[in-house]
Image (cartoon, grey):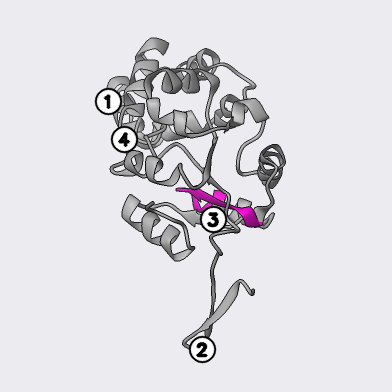
Amino acid sequence: MSGLEIINGGLKTWFKRCDLRTILFDLSEVFISGVYGVDGPIAELAGCTEPEVNRALNEQFQDILCGRITEQEYLSSAIGRNGWKVSVNDLKQIIRRNFHREVPGMMDLLPVLKPNYELALLSDHAVEWVEYIEARFEFLKYFEPRFYSYQLGQTKSVPTTFERVLNELGRTPEECIFVDDNPANIASAASIGLPGIHFQSVEQLSMALTERGVLLSD
């Protein structure tokens, strides 16, 4: 059977239920907040502007995500470069508090999907942040296996990251769907043939999954 059907004179791509085996999820801004949103509290504490905080945290961000530097080194460097009168522990607490924010409705979707599909996680994250998150959130038990950028030494901006993950899963791109809030990561996955859904809300995601033939009920 073809994976394309004609609708109103156009082509629509669809996925047969029997083809899909694995749903590969992002973590930050899909299930819980990542570092997005820490700029406000840090700016208030440090007495600077949010754009200044963003610029400071963007420097060496790839290094901490890929495990090349520690969180202590990353934050100490940002403080020193910018002359902030704050401590590393102050920034660590702000970052960890940010992780506590859950994306509405997403936790409830996991037990609905788990009986019918393999759920895996692929997240750009630092080792110290993952250790904190995994100790706090039980919903991560639904994802097996879990892949993190600090383990892989590369982020989702690199297409070969997805090739490595698919190889570990023993899956072809056609057997998977990738869900991420960052369009650039969706494009990176698409470059190796892995279809993706740009996450915006649980309602939008549920509709997009249903359109692709994903079972959302027993």
Q: Quadrant of residue 67?
A: top right
Mark 2 or mark 1: which comes first in sequence?
A: 2
- Whole-angstrom CA distance, mark 2 to mark 1, is 55 Å
The amino acid type found where label 4 is placed reads Glu
| Crowd around label 2: few <14 · some 14–19 · many ≥20 (10 Å) | few
> Which amino acid, mark 1?
Glu
- The disc labelled 2 sits on which kind of residue? Gly
Name the residue rendered at 36%, 27% in the picture. 99
As drawn, the label of residue 90 is none
Identify which residue is drawn at 54% across, 30% down.
59
Whether 128 is drawn above or below 187: the answer is above
Q: Which numbered tag is attached to residue 102?
A: 4
Which numbered circle lies on residue 196? 3
C-alpha distance separating marks 3 and 4: 22 Å
* Front label number (1 vs 3): 3
Q: Mark 1 — residue?
A: 44
Check contact, mark 2 vs mark 4: CB within 8 A.
no
Badge 1 density bin: few <14, some 14–19, many ≥20, Cα 10 Å: few
Label pair 2/3, CB-CB below 8 angstroms = no
Task: Find out whether the residues at labels 4 and 1 contact each other: C-beta distance under 8 Å.
Answer: no
Residue 87 in sight from this viewpoint: no
Q: Nearer the viewer, residue 123 or 79?
A: 123
Q: Secondary structure at mark 2?
A: loop
Image quadrant where one finds the N terminus: bottom right
- Which is more N-terminal, label 4 or label 2? 2
